[in-house]
Image (cartoon, rainbow, N blue to C red):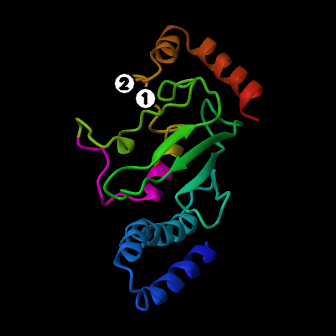
Amino acid sequence: MLTLASKLKRDDGLKGSRTSATTSDSTRRVSVRDKLLVKEVADLEANLPCTCKVHFPDPNKLHCFQLTVIPDEGYYQGGKFQFETEVPDAYNMVPPKVKCLTRIWHPNITETGEICLSLLREHSIDGTGWAPTRTLKDVVWGLNSLFTDLLNFDDPLNIEAAEHHLRDKEDFRNKVEDYIKRYAR
């Protein structure tokens, strides 16, 4: 993280000496997102849930990171679930794009990794979707909550998993445990 912060400070110092407006404008547009991310990542790391870990494969690209959620209670306890997050150039006017990389049997996450979490929607009917006041910390806490209090069987993305839970809770639990053993270790 310090590498990008140092780069941004250095770039700010160079802007004053540049004569090309085109280069300066394109750098400024990208750096707005990056400046936000430097602050938000520091806040996120200081307030990360104990069941989560964040990894930046390239410390110079704060807009691409991986999140690992290791639930300590509920159906998914003992699993290790990987998420990939990409923050678009238009952030914070649009939400980050998040995909679950771990195959999972979950009513709000498809087996292909799509996620149903209202704050990840640009437009939400219930008014709880993305807003420019939201941060990466909100996203991480929301993803973490999908394994506990936001686990929603009433408004599922994976209808088959939700119906399975309604039909036979014990068999649902067994299938979740099987997926954890096979895909989430």
Mark 1: secondary structure: loop
Mark 2: secondary structure: loop
Bin the neighbour count of mark 2 within 10 Å (Cα to Cα): few under 14, some 14-19, many 20 and up: few
Type of amino acid under label 1:
Asn
Residue 141 coordinates in the image, percent (x, y): 49, 51
Q: Which residue is mark 1?
A: 152
Residue 157 coordinates in the image, percent (x, y): 43, 24
Real-space CA distance between mark 2 and mark 1, rounded to the nearest whole angstrom: 6 Å
Bin the neighbour count of mark 1 within 10 Å (Cα to Cα): few under 14, some 14-19, many 20 and up: some
Quick check: marks 2 and 1 in contact, CB under 8 Å? yes
Label for residue 155? Answer: 2
Magenta part of the protein: which range?
Answer: 127-141
Residue 158 coordinates in the image, percent (x, y): 47, 20
Q: Is 131 colored magenta in this rendering?
A: yes
**Where, by quadrant of the figure, is residue 125 drawn?**
top left
Type of amino acid under label 2:
Asp
